[in-house]
Amino acid sequence: MSVKQKIESLRNELHKHNHLYYVLDNPEISDYEFDQKLKTLEKLEEQYPEYHDKNSPSQRVGGQVTKNFDTVKHRERMYSLSNSYSKSDLKDWVKRIRKSISEEINFTCELKYDGASINLSYKNNEFVRAATRGDGFEGDNVTHNVRTIKSVPLKIKNNSLPENFDIRGEIVLPFEGFAKLNAERIEQGLEAYANPRNTASGSLKLQDSSETAKRPLDCLVYGIQAEHLEFETQYTALETLRDIGFNVPREIKLCQNLDDVFNFINFWDKERHKLPYETDGVVVKVNSFEHQKVLGHTSKSPRWAMAYKFKAEEAKTTLNKITYQVGRTGAITPVANLEPVQISGTTVKRASLHNADQIKKLDVREGDMVYVEKGGEIIPKITKVDFTNRKQNSQPLDYIKNCPECNTPLRRDEGEAVHYCPNQSSCPPQVIGKIQHFISRKAMDIEGLGGETVALLVNNGLINNYADLYELDKNDVIGLERMAEKSAQNLIDGIERSKQRPFEKVLFALGIRYVGETVAKTIAGAFKNIDKIMEAQIEDLIEIDEIGDRIAESVVDFFNDDTNIELINRLKNYGLKFEIEEKEQFSKKLEGLKFVVSGVFKSFDRKELKKIIEDHSGKVVSSVSKNTNYVIAGDNMGPSKKDKAKQLNISIIDEQRFKSMLNE
Ligand SMILES: NC(=O)c1ccc[n+]([C@@H]2O[C@H](COP(=O)([O-])OP(=O)(O)OC[C@H]3O[C@@H](n4cnc5c(N)ncnc54)[C@H](O)[C@@H]3O)[C@@H](O)[C@H]2O)c1
Ligand SMILES: [Zn+2]
């Protein structure tokens, strides 16, 4: 390969990884690998300046604007940061600075928060707009999503900031919220998110901000941009921003010299694991704004800042055995069972190997010494094999050909990396997994029945599929582990009540591959009933917004399977809902609002009023709580409700005001 070709190929590779990382939030390689490739490219470009290209990944910020949002031009460019993995790079950096600045320099050290960059614009002390970094010149307008983040102040206390200013920060998803979100996803039978960073970034790009609001995102602030600022240093700027209500982490430190900086780095390399959110390094910034101005920027990053990146924690251990797990949809996941080892303060015993290709690529075998890395991911991964320690008699892994649970020959579809067990109707983990999905909260929400009981019912031969649930008899259930009369009755009642679940939930519950909660709602809304969906061809399905080939094919496949049709016919006979109930709704004006109605009204009776609220998508609740939005008060309103509402500062409105809400 010629040098030119080598450069081209690296550029293409890096473009691809930038796209995976910034646009799809789904990186394929580690940050460290990415940075190494970029460094190689930078070196080559330096050596061969004749191949300079202003569009090279070395010259441009990696992100881009998406077409799902309005595009916003940044008042001040949003830069990337130069990074290094070694202290000698930091020393070189300071030497370079010394060439242009002879005065004493000090530094602000901050942690490098690992999330998504954000720019918050303020005007007259009010939050007006939020934008992603995008390509650094322009980004996506994600104001409505950022508004839902509690640590972003919408109004700022009195201060001496100019009329217009921009705040720079990082949107992160703290570990606790990330774990909770994943627990919910697993319960709903969805795949867990890989790491907090990509989830935070993905959350900003959701179309429905009520979904963003459910994610406990935080905004950590590290900078301010404005035409004139009163502060002279980064450190005082940050301290002031914290005082006026921004979440500036307390870990920031003013360092007098490089030794202080190294101490800060050494300390946080270990201690960072105790922080509630993910960090991947330290950002060292020249403290004086005057000095920053002198140093300026390269095409991609400021010369006055340097990111020192921590290497993801890694450990070496023995891979004892590779086992295989079968998921609810039949997907096979190979799992590395390791000699237990400590990484980032936790004991790691297992690591995911993803699929057969990954095993081949790493050339990993049972008995190998392997390197295990734990980044923000919940499941640690194997990064490489220590070949110097490979045993003489070591053999390449023979990937299983049959299902470890039911012995059916595995299938692997063209273009798919994952093997499947096609035996959907009697492979035990698939049978159990499908029923567990069916009963889960976002699907049929069957109270009184949990995942373990499902396994128990299947293993005792009482049910083989979700339709069998509706033929369960209380007497069959009594006597199972922990099933007394009362819990058995609850279970039967819960199953009976589930017949009232709306069609979209039933459709989701069926467990069609790629048909998640939102897709089910979309399809149900478009076709109105199951018969129409069953007749639909791929072309009919892809005509619907947000339904692509993959989903369409999966839906058609599902209904081409006689076993599925038989199950659906049985469910129909039991009385489950297979069509949308067209509830007449006049508007969505009151959507998301909760009302308490009290007293006697002039223009309508109470029942009528409640119906009007529901017709406009509002909700009527019986007692006043902190979640109530309005109390509509008629004559002789109950005094206790009145007191409670006042105490909780909830608006009490009369019927006139209520009517005007509908006409607004
Ligand atoms: N794995 C992959 O495929 C892949 C692909 C592309 C990029 N990446 C990773 O992303 C990095 C490049 O991304 P980048 O250009 O966003 O650079 P970066 O993430 O290394 O640094 C710049 C960003 O750091 C953030 N930041 C966090 N804390 C900060 C602080 N205290 N002060 C200032 N900024 C702070 C800001 O959002 C800023 O935009 C690469 O080095 C690589 O590690 C990985
Ligand atoms: Zn199987």
Image: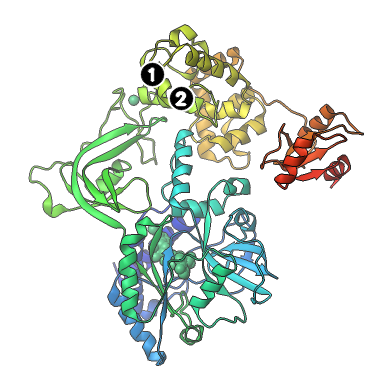
Q: Is residue 588 above or below residue 223?
A: above
First in sequence: mark 1 vs mark 2: 2
Q: Residues within 10 Å of mark 1 (few under 14, many from 20)?
A: some
Q: Which mark is residue 456?
A: 1
In the image, 488 versus 68, the foreground residue is 488
Q: How many discs mark residues in the rendered view?
A: 2
Residue at screen point 29% across, 57% down: 313
Residue 7 image point, x, y percent: 35, 69
Q: Is residue 397 above or below residue 141?
A: above
Kindly give the residue lying farthest to the top in the view shown.
475
Q: Which residue is mark 2?
A: 450
Dividing the image into 4 quarters, which one contains the N terminus?
bottom left
In the image, 511 versus 128, the foreground residue is 128
Disc 2 marks a residue whose amino acid type is Gly
Residue at screen point 65% across, 66% down: 156
Residue 386 placement, left or right of 117: left
Residue 194 image point, x, y percent: 41, 47
Q: Secondary structure at mark 2?
A: loop
Residue 348 image point, x, y percent: 27, 45
Split into quadrants, the picture shows ligand 2 in the one at top left
Residue at screen point 52% across, 72% down: 239
Residue 434 placement, left or right of 552: left
Q: Residues within 10 Å of mark 2 (few under 14, many from 20)?
A: some
Q: Which mark is residue 446?
A: none
